[in-house]
Amino acid sequence: MARKMKIGMVCSEYNYDITQMMLERAKEHAKFLDVEVAKVVMVPGVYDIPLAVKTLLKNKNVDGVVCIGAVIEGETEHDQIVIGQAARKMTDLAVEYEKPVGLGISGPGMSRLQAEDRIERAKDAVESVVKQWKALKQ
């Protein structure tokens, strides 16, 4: 019998009203897919996600990590820098630890309304991690 997949989730507290709804959708989808959420780590912002991802990926009981966040456009191009750097490091960590990392971070360049419209897409990051894990196990 195949063992049940275990994932970690890292969620940004910034734009809390949006990211908390995203986190709930991601957890519900993991349950629907019969995947155990081993640990949820809350971090201040999207830029802070990679360190928590690395900590979770080091754990032998975690098969993959889902990253949740919302990077909303401000008056500067700060949103571009935040998501660019965080996404790059998440990709590097996935390759380094040979475990899937799902990018459930919406943005950059979006308004608050656009972020709200994308809340359901957090489930896509869970789906991605599960599909990658299954593909790697074949």
Image (cartoon, helix red, strand yellow):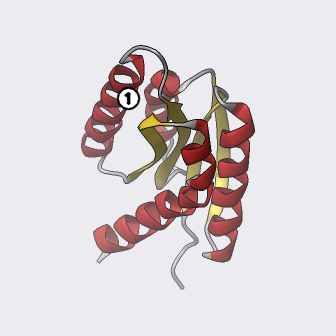
- The residue at 72%/43% (across/down) is 20
Residue 86 screen position, x and y as percent:
37, 29
- Split into 4 quadrants, where in the image is the N terminus? bottom right
Question: Which residue occupies the foreground of this view, 3 or 91?
Answer: 91
Q: Is residue 18 above or below residue 89?
A: below
- Split into 4 quadrants, where in the image is the C terminus? bottom left
Question: Which residue occupies the foreground of this view, 119 or 13?
Answer: 119
Element type at marker 1?
helix
Residue 75 screen position, x and y as percent:
46, 15
Residue 50 screen position, x and y as percent:
43, 29
Left or right? Give the position of 109 relative to 38. left
**Residue 17 found in image quarter:** top right
Left or right? Give the position of 15 relative to 134. right
Check disc 1: other Cα within 10 Å, few if <14, some if 14-19, many if 20+.
some
- The residue at 66%/30% (across/down) is 15
Residue 12 screen position, x and y as percent:
60, 31
Left or right? Give the position of 52 relative to 31. left
Q: Is residue 59 above or below residue 122?
A: above
Which amino acid does the dot numbered 1 rest on? Ala
Q: Is residue 97 above or below residue 43?
A: below
- The residue at 48%/67% (across/down) is 127
Which residue is denoted by mark 1 in the rendering?
A: 86
Question: Which residue occupies the foreground of this view, 76 or 126?
Answer: 76
- The residue at 66%/45% (across/down) is 39
How many numbered marks appear? 1
Q: Is residue 17 above or below residue 136?
A: above
Question: Looking at the image, which residue sits at the far bottom?
Answer: 1
